[in-house]
Amino acid sequence: MNNDSKTEIIDSSIKSILRVTIPVILSTVSISLMFLIDRFFLAGYSVDAMNAACISGNFVAMLSLFFIGITGAAGVFVGQYNGARQYRMLAVPVWQMIYFSLASAPLFLLLAYFSPYLNMLPQYFLKDGVVYQQTLMCLGFLGPLRVSVTAFFVGQGKTKIIACSALIGAITNIVLDYLLIYGVPGTIPSLGCRGAAIATNISEFTQVMILTSIFFNSHNRKKFKILESRKLNFEIFKGCYRIGFPMSIGHFAVMLAWYMLQTIIGHTSRDASTVYNIALNIFMFFFFISGGLGRSAMSICSNMIGRDDILSVRETYKFFVIMSVCLGSLIAVPLICCPHWILSVLNGLSDDISALYPQIKMALLFVSIAITLETIFQSTFGVILSGGDAKFGIFVDMVCLWIIVVTPTAVLYFANMLHSSQIVFGFMILRSMVSSSILYARYKSMKWCKKLV
């Protein structure tokens, strides 16, 4: 029996879907937990440091996701090649995106150098924010590089590898966060925001090294002709670029919107910024999980499209919608009914913010609703992306965010009517409702479903 016949078929059975999806969710939980604990450690060091890192980290993510949008498109090609059993083509799109990621390194270094001038931070967050932004930016190319190599495994449904690397990266980040943010008397100086950024960079590097070593192992070199696939292939590069570039523009515009929101609220007041960033950190923690569902849906459905099994795509989508509602409800219940466990954690911060607890409770209520709607949106977007249709979903996400959330928030700010961040979360719920409805209509039309290989 040859190696090709040993490759597992990804179908619409619950067992097959969960085999791919659960490790992806675990990997996104690991990454999300890493960022959440990172912010918590910084809040323990200084609430201003946490707020500064939230705003500056969003700026770096905005630039990094521009490249990740393109490199992530390799997963669509890997999935469809895998579904069509063209196994010796799997590494070709991965190599193209590895080259693209490495080519972005000089740009990130240049942006790091000019970081003191590339921010919109209020004065009270400026010092910590610039240090965090500059340090992260130095190795900003590692994110796109990690996603490039990850595409090789996601497209085949080999998601346990990704989960393991993400877990190791998260543990590495958490340990280094504690050591570098607070320091060890007589051994390691307290580095605050710089220490948090260094810990994140080392974590990213660790994940890249783990994934790369598996990518180049003897089995993959023999079965998928990894080394023979390293030549530049402009046709496939253009294919990845064609799918990924709209996502890059969309990701950039979406992250710019989040950055603008954080900046506006940051300039409103310290208290408004604190409430917003605490609630947003929780939202982003679960948002990554929603994104994991979307990645899983893209991987599974691209395999099905590669073998012309459209009926299974429809069955898979129904399962993902059910899973999205269940997961969203599971998340919402503790946030709505038991917010005291979050408040008890906040009691341990370096600054007393107990006066803000009523506002934080209300923000958590809004966040819980927004998370459920966002999970449905991400699952639908993943299915549509499996057919190569990146433009529609990202355009809807971008336009709805700017028109429904950013614009009214900016109007309220300039009219001196923005006194808290709670109304912004109300706008977020409305945006998720509208964008999910539009994207579902696109799914029903089936205009997105195309075989690319």
Image (spheres, grey):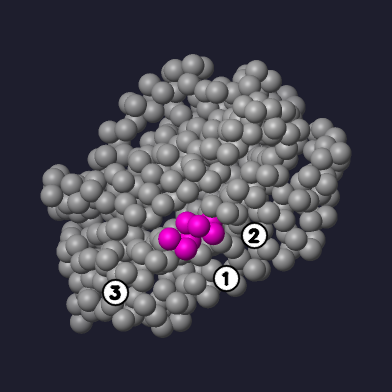
Residue 325 tag number: 1
- Secondary element at tag 1: helix
* Residue 192 percent coordinates (x, y): 66, 28
Quarter of the image for residue 92 reads bottom left
Gap between marks 2 and 3, in whole Å?
32 Å
Label 3: which residue? Answer: 304
Residue 50 tag number: none
Residue at x 62%, y 27% (from the top left corner): 414
* Residue 208 percent coordinates (x, y): 40, 46
Q: Nearer the viewer, mark 2 or mark 3?
A: 2
Gap between marks 1 and 3, in whole Å?
23 Å
Q: Compared to 206, does 48 lie above or below?
A: above
Residue at x 44%, y 23% (from the top left corner): 112
Tag 3 or tag 2, which sits nearer the N-term? 3
Residue 369 tag number: 2
Q: Over which residues does the magenta segment extend?
A: 432-438
Gap between marks 2 and 1, in whole Å?
11 Å
Choose between 19 and 17: the one closer to the eye.
Answer: 17
The crowding category of the residue bearing disc 3, from other C-alpha atoms within 10 Å (few below 14, some 14 to 19, many at least 20), is: many
Q: Is residue 193 left or right of residue 247?
A: right
Q: Is residue 433 magenta?
A: yes
Residue 307 appears in the figure: yes
